[in-house]
Amino acid sequence: MSDSAVRTIWARPFLRGASIALFVSGIGVGATMPQMTLYLVDELHASLPVAGLYSLVNVMAPIAGFVLGSLSDRLP
């Protein structure tokens, strides 16, 4: 009988701690993202297109990391 991924993660302390840390850091990054854009525009006087590009790059970075990681895993 195979265990589910949730049971496997919950049974191992290292995986459980790593999963909780990733979840908490994801909440932190998600909460600071709007403030970073406001900081760029209000305090650093960046233009709106520059702030939009910053946000777009931050949204696309995990997708690009996944694509490049899967590509590098297939290379010899």
Image (cartoon, rainbow, N blue to C red):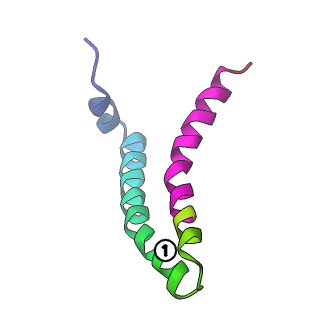
Q: Tell me what residue is drawn at x 28 percent, y 15 percent.
A: 2
* Left/right of residue 16 with respect to residue 73 in the rendered view: left
Residue 36 position within the rendered picture, expressed as x and y whole percent measured from the top left = 49, 74
Instruction: Provide the secondary structure element on which disc 1 rests.
Output: helix
Q: Tell me what residue is drawn at x 37 percent, y 68 percent.
A: 31
Nearer-the-camera pick, 12 or 7: 7
For the C terminus, the image quarter is top right
- Within-10-Å neighbours for mark 1: few <14, some 14–19, many 20+: some
Seen as rendered, the residue at the extreme bottom is 43
Nearer-the-camera pick, 50 or 10: 50
Q: Tell me what residue is drawn at x 58 percent, y 42 percent.
A: 64
For the N terminus, the image quarter is top left
Q: Is residue 67 magenta?
A: yes
Does 75 appear above or below 31? Answer: above
* Left/right of residue 67 with respect to residue 21 in the rendered view: right
What stretch of residues is rendered in magenta? 54-74
* Left/right of residue 69 with respect to residue 58 in the rendered view: right
**Predominant SS along the magenta part:** helix
Nearer-the-camera pick, 4 or 43: 43
* Left/right of residue 67 with respect to residue 32 in the rendered view: right
Q: Which residue is mark 1?
A: 36
Indicate the amino acid at tag 1: Met
Does 60 appear above or below 68? Answer: below
Does 38 appear above or below 66? Answer: below
**Quadrant location of residue 53?**
bottom right
Residue 50 position within the rendered picture, expressed as x and y whole percent measured from the top left = 59, 70
**Quadrant location of residue 34?**
bottom left
Q: Tell me what residue is drawn at x 41 percent, y 54 percent.
A: 21
Residue 75 position within the rendered picture, expressed as x and y whole percent measured from the top left = 71, 21
Seen as rendered, the residue at the extreme top is 1
